[in-house]
């Protein structure tokens, strides 16, 4: 009798233990594209072949109103730390303006996702673009010094895809070793290798995949470019209209949001010379995104092989809107290997033709070009402006979430707004980690973000009272349906985002009290978040002009 009671008690305890056992913590893969416009992938309206991302979106959740910070470095600082970029010391690029928010080097009063997840038992690895410390500095702020156990990628912000500048393995600089080396493909291969190694361990892993595609230069294998050689003959105006129609049909954007008009700096397709060159630039850009998707496919295939896909949380997003930057010819700075990302010669010794020259068709290793404002305008369909600016075209990012164990309402969109600062909070939440008050003797800036996990579960999260931006004197604040925004040196504009997300109907003159209230909140945030004194900000090109005049 006593033995029977003992067995019952033991079995009951075992059952309770089984019930109380927590679900296994997910692996986390954070994938970021570089200079990818809002409409540049299939799940957000593009014609470019992105079958891997299509499948992740079909079996996951898409955010229609997710935001970045409009530029490479600030976005990476915000993504990694869960803070606004100025709080992490990178309000601009890798320049030190001798102000706390603009040191151009990830500060020690912030912690990275890897630094938070590693003490919680996660293995950590990174592939790709780091770009939160000067490339001429020592390795004090390289990935292995900020919580990652493994690293393969580049420290600098851009470079040839055939021979990338500052290529590094762990803490050791290396060099592309063969003529058919293609960076996007190599990142996919290395990421799959890391998954192969890490998925065999009992602990979950965090993998940060920071691709450089489709950032300039326009480089891609010729066979892939050929897939798109005739696709863009109708020009950018036709492409924008086509994508917008597709977006409305899919539910990416609301039908009442009008397509923004062609930008003043973008000519009519019918009026331009050198059409073959323009078509080629967009074909190369499309091929770069095609290869990006192929490399993400390598990661997904490896997860399936390791039976890890269902319990892996995958994020896919972009660091800013499409890039309208031109590409100047070679200059004296290109002769300095410590600061230039533009190689003078290919691996096999040919001269690199640097600059947007219509006589040179981009794509090969001996070219170095960008795709310009014309195609960037199409990338950001249906929004206004580009990378650098905090109007919707500069800060709107696709965000795909794939996590089969949690996301039940598959192939759906959410219009709940989110921001980069929410990624760290989400990782901390799903990993059961603790965001520290202190780390390695430094007091850590409190986390700004809020977890997105309730949204994944189909719930309504409380969200932020306000979300803020500043970059190069361009400023914005969003509160609910209202967004206050301005370009540097201009007046505030006010938009009702629910009805006019393409920012065509400025209500600032009619809603003066709202403008006053929201601008005051922006000023208060700017003081708190190391943005001020923003009034003294001058974009780098203005500083260069002043120096030339003084000289």
Image (spheres, rainbow, N blue to C red):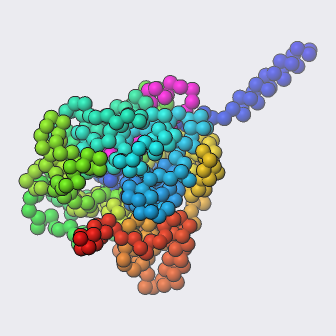
* Residue displayed at 29% across by 43% down: 165
Tell me the quarter of the image containing the C terminus.
bottom left
Position of 385 with respect to 314 (left or right) is left
Q: Position of residue 480 (x, y in %)?
A: 52, 68
Q: How many marks?
A: 0
Along the line of sight, which residue is nearer the eye, 538 or 398?
A: 538
Residue 345: image quadrant is top left
Residue 203 lies in the magenta-colored region: yes
Query: Relative to residue 222, is residue 460 depicted above or below?
Result: below
Front residue (pair 547, 225): 547
**Magenta-span inclusion, residue 218:** no
- Quick check: 462 above or below 14? below
Query: Residue 134, position in %: x, y?
Result: 38, 50
Task: Report whether residue 442 is seen.
Answer: yes
Residue under the point 17% across and 54% down: 330
- x, y percent for residue 143: 45, 41
Q: Position of residue 492 (x, y in %)?
A: 42, 78
Range drawn in magenta: 195-213
Q: Vertical placement of 237 versus 20: above or below?
A: below
**Viewer-proximal residue, 479 or 256?**
479
Image quarter (top left, top right, bottom left or bottom right) of the N terminus: top right
């Amino acid at each position: 009798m006593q033995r029977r009671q003992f067995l019952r008690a033991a079995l009951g305890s075992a059952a309770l233990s089984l019930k109380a056992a927590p679900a296994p913590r997910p692996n986390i893969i954070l994938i970021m594209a570089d200079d990818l416009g809002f409409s540049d992938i299939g799940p957000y309206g593009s014609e470019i072949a992105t079958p891997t991302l299509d499948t992740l979106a079909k079996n996951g959740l898409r955010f229609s109103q997710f935001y970045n910070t409009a530029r490479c470095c600030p976005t990476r600082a915000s993504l990694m730390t869960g803070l606004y970029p100025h709080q992490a010391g990178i309000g601009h690029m890798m320049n030190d303006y001798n102000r706390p928010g603009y040191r151009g080097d990830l500060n020690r009063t912030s912690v990275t996702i890897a630094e938070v997840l590693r003490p919680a038992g996660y293995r950590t690895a990174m592939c790709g673009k780091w770009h939160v410390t000067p490339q001429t500095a020592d390795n004090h702020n390289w990935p292995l010094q900020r919580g990652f156990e493994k690293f393969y990628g580049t420290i600098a912000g851009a470079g040839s895809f055939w021979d990338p500048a500052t290529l590094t393995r762990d803490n050791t600089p290396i060099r592309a070793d063969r003529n058919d080396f293609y960076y996007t493909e190599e990142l996919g291969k290395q990421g799959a290798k890391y998954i192969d190694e890490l998925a065999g361990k009992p602990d979950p892993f965090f993998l940060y995949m920071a691709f450089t595609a489709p950032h300039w230069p326009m480089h891609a294998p010729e066979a892939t470019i050929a897939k798109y050689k005739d696709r863009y003959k109708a020009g950018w105006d036709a492409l924008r209209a086509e994508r917008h129609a597709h977006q409305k049909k899919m539910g990416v954007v609301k039908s009442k949001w009008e397509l923004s008009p062609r930008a003043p700096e973008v000519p009519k397709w019918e009026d331009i010379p050198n059409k073959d060159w323009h078509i080629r630039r967009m074909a190369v850009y499309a091929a770069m995104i095609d290869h990006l998707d192929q490399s993400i496919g390598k990661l997904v295939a490896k997860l399936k092989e390791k039976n890890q896909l269902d319990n892996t949380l995958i994020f896919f997003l972009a660091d800013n809107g499409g890039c309208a930057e031109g590409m100047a010819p070679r200059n004296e700075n290109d002769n300095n290997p410590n600061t230039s990302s533009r190689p003078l010669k290919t691996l096999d010794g040919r001269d690199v033709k640097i600059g947007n020259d219509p006589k040179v068709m981009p794509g090969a290793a001996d070219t170095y070009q960008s795709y310009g404002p014309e195609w960037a305008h199409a990338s950001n369909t249906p929004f206004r402006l580009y990378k650098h600016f905090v109007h919707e075209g500069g800060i709107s990012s696709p965000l795909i979430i794939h996590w089969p164990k949690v996301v039940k309402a598959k192939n759906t969109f959410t219009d709940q707004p989110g921001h980069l600062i929410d990624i760290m909070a989400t990782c901390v939440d799903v990993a059961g980690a603790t965001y520290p008050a202190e780390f390695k003797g430094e007091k850590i800036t409190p986390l700004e973000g809020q977890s997105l996990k309730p949204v994944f579960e189909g719930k309504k999260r409380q969200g932020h009272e306000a979300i803020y931006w500043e970059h190069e004197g361009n400023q914005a604040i969003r509160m609910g349906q209202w967004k206050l925004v301005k370009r540097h040196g201009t007046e505030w504009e006010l938009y009702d985002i629910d009805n006019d997300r393409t920012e065509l109907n400025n209500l600032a003159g009619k809603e003066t009290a709202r403008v006053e209230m929201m601008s005051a909140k922006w000023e208060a945030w700017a003081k708190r978040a190391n943005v001020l004194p923003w009034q003294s900000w001058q974009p780098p090109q203005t500083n260069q002009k002043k120096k030339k005049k003084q000289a």
